[in-house]
Image (cartoon, coloured by chain):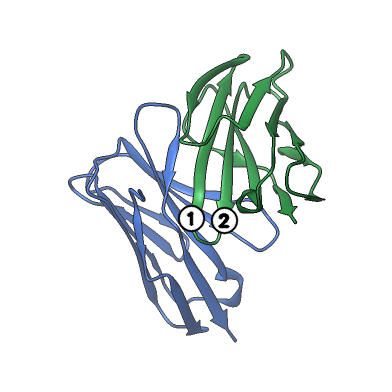
Protein backbone atom coordinates (compact mmCIF):
# COMPACT_ATOMS: atom_id res chain seq x y z
CA UNK A 1 0.00 0.00 0.00
CA UNK A 2 1.41 3.35 -1.08
CA UNK A 3 0.75 5.81 1.72
CA UNK A 4 1.88 8.78 -0.33
CA UNK A 5 0.52 9.50 -3.79
CA UNK A 6 2.47 11.85 -6.01
CA UNK A 7 1.14 13.62 -9.07
CA UNK A 8 1.80 13.97 -11.83
CA UNK A 9 3.92 10.88 -12.44
CA UNK A 10 5.68 12.45 -15.41
CA UNK A 11 6.15 16.06 -16.41
CA UNK A 12 7.92 17.40 -19.47
CA UNK A 13 8.24 21.17 -19.75
CA UNK A 14 10.36 23.79 -21.42
CA UNK A 15 12.93 25.93 -19.70
CA UNK A 16 11.39 28.95 -18.04
CA UNK A 17 8.02 27.39 -17.28
CA UNK A 18 6.58 27.03 -13.78
CA UNK A 19 5.34 23.76 -12.33
CA UNK A 20 3.81 22.25 -9.23
CA UNK A 21 4.18 18.71 -7.95
CA UNK A 22 1.78 17.28 -5.40
CA UNK A 23 2.16 14.74 -2.63
CA UNK A 24 -1.02 13.51 -0.95
CA UNK A 25 -1.86 11.05 1.79
CA UNK A 26 -4.72 10.05 4.05
CA UNK A 27 -2.20 9.67 6.87
CA UNK A 28 -0.81 12.35 9.13
CA UNK A 29 2.96 12.67 9.26
CA UNK A 30 5.16 14.26 11.89
CA UNK A 31 7.29 15.68 9.10
CA UNK A 32 7.61 15.45 5.36
CA UNK A 33 10.72 15.54 3.24
CA UNK A 34 11.41 16.17 -0.42
CA UNK A 35 14.28 14.53 -2.26
CA UNK A 36 15.61 14.80 -5.80
CA UNK A 37 17.21 11.84 -7.50
CA UNK A 38 19.24 12.03 -10.67
CA UNK A 39 19.96 9.00 -12.87
CA UNK A 40 22.60 6.71 -11.41
CA UNK A 41 22.58 8.45 -8.05
CA UNK A 42 20.84 8.17 -4.74
CA UNK A 43 18.17 10.66 -3.62
CA UNK A 44 19.41 13.95 -2.18
CA UNK A 45 17.44 15.73 0.52
CA UNK A 46 16.04 19.11 -0.55
CA UNK A 47 13.95 20.14 2.44
CA UNK A 48 12.14 18.97 5.56
CA UNK A 49 8.81 20.52 6.59
CA UNK A 50 7.50 19.92 10.06
CA UNK A 51 4.72 22.36 10.94
CA UNK A 52 1.28 22.28 9.34
CA UNK A 53 0.96 25.20 6.92
CA UNK A 54 4.72 25.67 6.79
CA UNK A 55 6.21 27.17 3.65
CA UNK A 56 9.91 26.90 2.84
CA UNK A 57 11.77 28.42 -0.05
CA UNK A 58 14.98 27.13 -1.57
CA UNK A 59 15.96 29.54 -4.36
CA UNK A 60 13.38 28.85 -7.12
CA UNK A 61 11.76 25.97 -5.20
CA UNK A 62 8.86 26.55 -2.81
CA UNK A 63 7.68 23.77 -0.53
CA UNK A 64 4.41 23.78 1.40
CA UNK A 65 3.14 21.42 4.09
CA UNK A 66 -0.62 21.12 4.37
CA UNK A 67 -2.39 22.43 7.45
CA UNK A 68 -3.40 18.90 8.43
CA UNK A 69 0.10 17.55 7.74
CA UNK A 70 -1.25 15.04 5.23
CA UNK A 71 -0.12 16.63 1.99
CA UNK A 72 2.58 18.79 0.50
CA UNK A 73 3.44 20.56 -2.71
CA UNK A 74 6.59 21.59 -4.49
CA UNK A 75 6.49 24.58 -6.82
CA UNK A 76 9.36 25.37 -9.16
CA UNK A 77 9.56 28.80 -10.73
CA UNK A 78 11.29 29.32 -14.08
CA UNK A 79 12.45 25.72 -14.40
CA UNK A 80 15.93 25.04 -15.73
CA UNK A 81 17.40 21.91 -17.34
CA UNK A 82 19.37 21.35 -14.15
CA UNK A 83 16.06 20.78 -12.35
CA UNK A 84 15.56 17.56 -14.31
CA UNK A 85 15.24 14.53 -12.08
CA UNK A 86 12.95 12.37 -10.00
CA UNK A 87 11.27 14.28 -7.18
CA UNK A 88 10.31 12.14 -4.20
CA UNK A 89 8.27 13.03 -1.16
CA UNK A 90 8.66 11.03 2.03
CA UNK A 91 6.60 11.10 5.19
CA UNK A 92 7.99 10.40 8.62
CA UNK A 93 6.21 9.15 11.71
CA UNK A 94 7.26 6.83 14.48
CA UNK A 95 9.17 3.70 13.58
CA UNK A 96 12.43 4.96 12.09
CA UNK A 97 11.24 4.47 8.51
CA UNK A 98 10.27 6.91 5.79
CA UNK A 99 7.26 6.26 3.57
CA UNK A 100 8.12 7.35 0.06
CA UNK A 101 5.86 8.27 -2.80
CA UNK A 102 6.67 6.79 -6.21
CA UNK A 103 7.96 10.12 -7.40
CA UNK A 104 7.43 12.65 -10.15
CA UNK A 105 9.83 12.40 -13.06
CA UNK A 106 10.57 15.91 -14.35
CA UNK A 107 12.23 16.70 -17.68
CA UNK A 108 13.11 20.29 -18.46
CA UNK A 109 14.22 20.88 -22.03
CA UNK A 110 16.16 23.95 -23.21
CA UNK B 1 33.42 14.64 4.57
CA UNK B 2 32.96 11.42 2.63
CA UNK B 3 29.43 10.41 1.74
CA UNK B 4 27.70 7.07 2.04
CA UNK B 5 29.59 4.39 0.15
CA UNK B 6 27.91 1.32 -1.24
CA UNK B 7 29.58 -1.69 -2.81
CA UNK B 8 29.33 -3.23 -5.28
CA UNK B 9 27.67 -0.69 -7.58
CA UNK B 10 26.48 -3.28 -10.06
CA UNK B 11 26.08 -7.01 -9.92
CA UNK B 12 24.39 -9.78 -11.84
CA UNK B 13 23.21 -12.97 -10.22
CA UNK B 14 21.09 -15.91 -11.23
CA UNK B 15 17.96 -17.21 -9.55
CA UNK B 16 18.63 -19.19 -6.41
CA UNK B 17 21.93 -17.51 -5.62
CA UNK B 18 22.51 -15.25 -2.68
CA UNK B 19 24.02 -11.76 -2.54
CA UNK B 20 25.60 -9.53 0.09
CA UNK B 21 25.65 -5.75 -0.26
CA UNK B 22 27.78 -3.44 1.82
CA UNK B 23 27.26 0.10 3.08
CA UNK B 24 29.66 2.45 4.84
CA UNK B 25 27.79 5.38 6.42
CA UNK B 26 28.97 8.95 6.84
CA UNK B 27 31.43 9.21 9.69
CA UNK B 28 29.55 9.84 12.94
CA UNK B 29 26.24 8.52 11.66
CA UNK B 30 25.01 5.56 13.67
CA UNK B 31 21.69 4.95 11.94
CA UNK B 32 21.71 3.01 8.68
CA UNK B 33 18.60 2.25 6.63
CA UNK B 34 18.12 0.13 3.55
CA UNK B 35 15.58 0.70 0.79
CA UNK B 36 14.68 -1.21 -2.35
CA UNK B 37 13.83 0.93 -5.39
CA UNK B 38 11.96 -0.47 -8.40
CA UNK B 39 10.12 1.36 -11.19
CA UNK B 40 6.82 -0.18 -10.18
CA UNK B 41 6.93 0.20 -6.41
CA UNK B 42 9.27 3.13 -5.86
CA UNK B 43 11.32 3.13 -2.67
CA UNK B 44 10.31 0.45 -0.20
CA UNK B 45 11.75 0.33 3.32
CA UNK B 46 13.71 -2.82 4.16
CA UNK B 47 15.18 -2.25 7.63
CA UNK B 48 16.94 0.23 9.88
CA UNK B 49 19.83 -0.31 12.26
CA UNK B 50 21.16 1.80 15.08
CA UNK B 51 24.17 0.83 17.18
CA UNK B 52 24.09 -2.73 15.84
CA UNK B 53 20.39 -3.20 16.70
CA UNK B 54 17.61 -3.58 14.15
CA UNK B 55 14.96 -1.11 15.22
CA UNK B 56 12.49 -1.53 12.41
CA UNK B 57 11.83 -3.91 9.55
CA UNK B 58 9.73 -3.45 6.44
CA UNK B 59 7.33 -5.89 4.87
CA UNK B 60 9.82 -8.11 3.06
CA UNK B 61 10.24 -11.90 3.28
CA UNK B 62 12.79 -13.48 5.56
CA UNK B 63 15.14 -13.96 2.59
CA UNK B 64 16.11 -10.34 3.17
CA UNK B 65 18.33 -9.83 6.19
CA UNK B 66 20.85 -7.35 7.42
CA UNK B 67 23.27 -6.51 10.14
CA UNK B 68 25.31 -3.63 11.45
CA UNK B 69 28.80 -3.75 12.81
CA UNK B 70 30.35 -1.85 15.72
CA UNK B 71 31.87 0.69 13.30
CA UNK B 72 28.32 1.38 11.96
CA UNK B 73 29.04 -0.27 8.61
CA UNK B 74 26.13 -2.36 7.46
CA UNK B 75 25.48 -5.30 5.18
CA UNK B 76 22.33 -6.71 3.75
CA UNK B 77 21.89 -10.19 2.39
CA UNK B 78 19.33 -11.64 0.05
CA UNK B 79 19.17 -15.42 -0.18
CA UNK B 80 17.54 -17.61 -2.79
CA UNK B 81 17.29 -14.77 -5.28
CA UNK B 82 14.18 -14.36 -7.39
CA UNK B 83 13.73 -12.43 -10.63
CA UNK B 84 11.61 -9.89 -8.74
CA UNK B 85 14.54 -9.02 -6.51
CA UNK B 86 16.11 -7.10 -9.40
CA UNK B 87 16.26 -3.55 -8.12
CA UNK B 88 18.39 -0.68 -6.96
CA UNK B 89 19.24 -1.21 -3.30
CA UNK B 90 19.86 2.06 -1.51
CA UNK B 91 21.56 2.55 1.81
CA UNK B 92 21.09 5.74 3.80
CA UNK B 93 22.66 7.00 6.97
CA UNK B 94 21.53 9.63 9.43
CA UNK B 95 22.77 11.22 12.62
CA UNK B 96 20.93 9.92 15.67
CA UNK B 97 18.00 9.21 13.34
CA UNK B 98 17.09 12.84 12.79
CA UNK B 99 14.93 11.61 9.96
CA UNK B 100 17.08 13.29 7.36
CA UNK B 101 18.66 10.60 5.26
CA UNK B 102 21.87 10.76 3.29
CA UNK B 103 21.78 8.16 0.53
CA UNK B 104 24.52 6.30 -1.22
CA UNK B 105 24.50 5.80 -4.98
CA UNK B 106 23.02 2.35 -4.60
CA UNK B 107 23.81 -1.19 -5.65
CA UNK B 108 22.01 -2.23 -8.81
CA UNK B 109 21.19 -5.92 -8.68
CA UNK B 110 20.05 -7.82 -11.74
CA UNK B 111 18.74 -11.36 -11.27
CA UNK B 112 18.66 -13.53 -14.39
Which structural element holds mark 2?
Answer: strand
Instruction: Point out residue B1 in the picture as x, y percentages from the top left corner.
Output: 75, 35
Q: Chain of mark 2?
A: B
**Left or right: B75 as drawn, with respect to A12:** right
Does residue B7 sit above or below A89 in this rendering? above
- Chain letter for blue? A
Check whether the beta carbons of the residues at disc 1 and disc 2 lie within 8 A of each other.
yes
Q: Chain of mark 1?
A: B
Which structural element holds mark 1?
Answer: loop
Q: Residue at x 34, y 39 (%)?
A: A31
Q: Residues within 10 Å of mark 1 (few under 14, many from 20)?
A: few
Does residue A21 sit above or below B28 in this rendering? below
Residue A49 visible? The answer is: no
* Residue under numbered circle 2: B38
- Please identify which colour was used for chain B in the image: green
Outermost residue toward the left in this view: A68
Q: Residues within 10 Å of mark 2 (few under 14, many from 20)?
A: some
Q: Residue at x 78, y 50 (%)?
A: B14
* Residue under numbered circle 1: B41
Are discs 1 and 2 both within one chain?
A: yes
Quarter residue A107 falls in = bottom right
Instruction: Tell me how far mark 1 sits from mark 2, CA to CA.
Output: 5 Å
Instruction: Point out residue A7 in the picture as x, y percentages from the top left corner.
Output: 35, 67
Does residue A62 sit above or below B4 in this rendering? below
Q: Can you say which quadrant of the picture contains the C terminus of chain A? A: bottom right
Amino acid sequence: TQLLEQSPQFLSIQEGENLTVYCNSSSVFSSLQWYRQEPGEGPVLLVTVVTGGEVKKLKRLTFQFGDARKDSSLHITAAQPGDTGLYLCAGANSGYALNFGKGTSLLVTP
Amino acid sequence: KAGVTQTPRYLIKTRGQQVTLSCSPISGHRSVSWYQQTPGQGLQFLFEYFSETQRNKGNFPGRFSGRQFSNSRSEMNVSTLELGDSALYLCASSFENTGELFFGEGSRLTVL
